Amino acid sequence: MFRLQGGKTLAVDLTGDGVKAKNGSMVAYDGRMAFKKMSGGGEGIRGMVTRRLTGEQMTMMEVTGQGTCYFADRASEISLVTLRGDKLYVEASNLLATDSGLRTGTSFTGVRGGASGNGLFTTTVEGTGQAAIVSDGTAVVLRVTTRYPLSVDPGAYIAHQGNLQQHFQSGVNFRTLMGEGSGESFQIRFEGEGLVYVQPSERNTLGGDV
Amino acid sequence: MPFREINAKMVEAAVVPGQKMYSQRGAMLAYRGDVTFTRTRGAVRAAWPR
């Protein structure tokens, strides 16, 4: 149902079913389509309250119809993620589209979220189906195993899935305080079994230059 | 120091115990293993001014 066209455009074939996509990300379509605004953080009143409390603002739209709809986001690279009953954690700004059958919500990330510059909460996508995420440059998928934990720059992190525990780790020392930091003083450490999506570019983050 | 090109925008470097490697400050995206990062000055910094 989801297919990439050139890495920066997502084509979704619809046969009367629907797809959820970032608001305003449609660039073209053929056939008959209807666009309806939605909001992230989950559906219904619970979702509305969650959005108010968490500040995780992800404005999305539901697209239904018959034909092919094309999506893109400022020429960002797009990666497809297949979910088989598991959960994807993704920064709201990096989520482009999901199958309409996938559930979206929010999850508390604490210090990690604050450090990555995306607030204390992140977006979750759960169920069985496909999702499309965007990145600044082609993202790589790095596998985490129990034997090989992974540390990621908070500004380069975009998403993860699987059974992963994440910890915020800091390498701040005396040199950092004297303005002689390496520029790599903060990382997110992932342990367990799963996949982490990393982009070849770094957002502005808290402490990103120390 | 072996480098591996992951794609046109990322490179992977294997850091060998006891050896150092140099990169532009802040360029690390992710790593596995026991790695430390130290700011350097001198010729390397002159080559990659920030």
Image (tube, coloured by chain):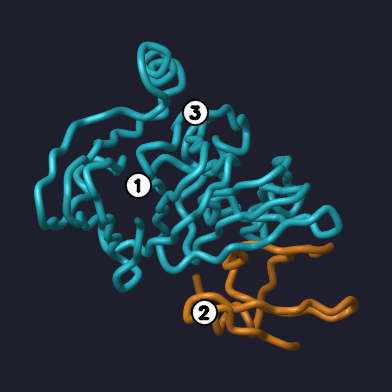
Chain colours: A cyan, B orange
Query: Contact, CB < 8 Å: mark 3 with mark 1?
Result: no
Residue matched to label 1: A97
Inter-mark Cα distance, 3 to 2: 32 Å
Left or right: where A100 falls relative to A184: left
Q: Residue at x 50, y 66 (%)?
A: A200
Residue matched to label 3: A106
The subunit letter for the residue under badge 2 reads B
Q: Residue at x 24, y 36 (%)?
A: A61
The subunit letter for the residue under badge 1 reads A
Looking at the rendered structure, the kind of residue marked 1 is: Ala
Residue matched to label 2: B7
- Badge 3 marks a residue whose secondary structure is strand
Q: Between residues A154 and A11, which one lies in front from this camera angle?
A: A11
Looking at the rendered structure, the kind of residue marked 2 is: Asn
Left or right: where A99 falls relative to B1: left
Q: Residue at x 26, y 57 (%)?
A: A72
Residue furthest right in the image: B18
Query: Contact, CB < 8 Å: mark 3 with mark 2?
Result: no
Instruction: Say few, some or many: other residues with alpha carbon within 10 Å of mark 3 (under 14 / 14 to 19 / 20 or more).
Output: many
Looking at the rendered structure, the kind of residue marked 3 is: Thr
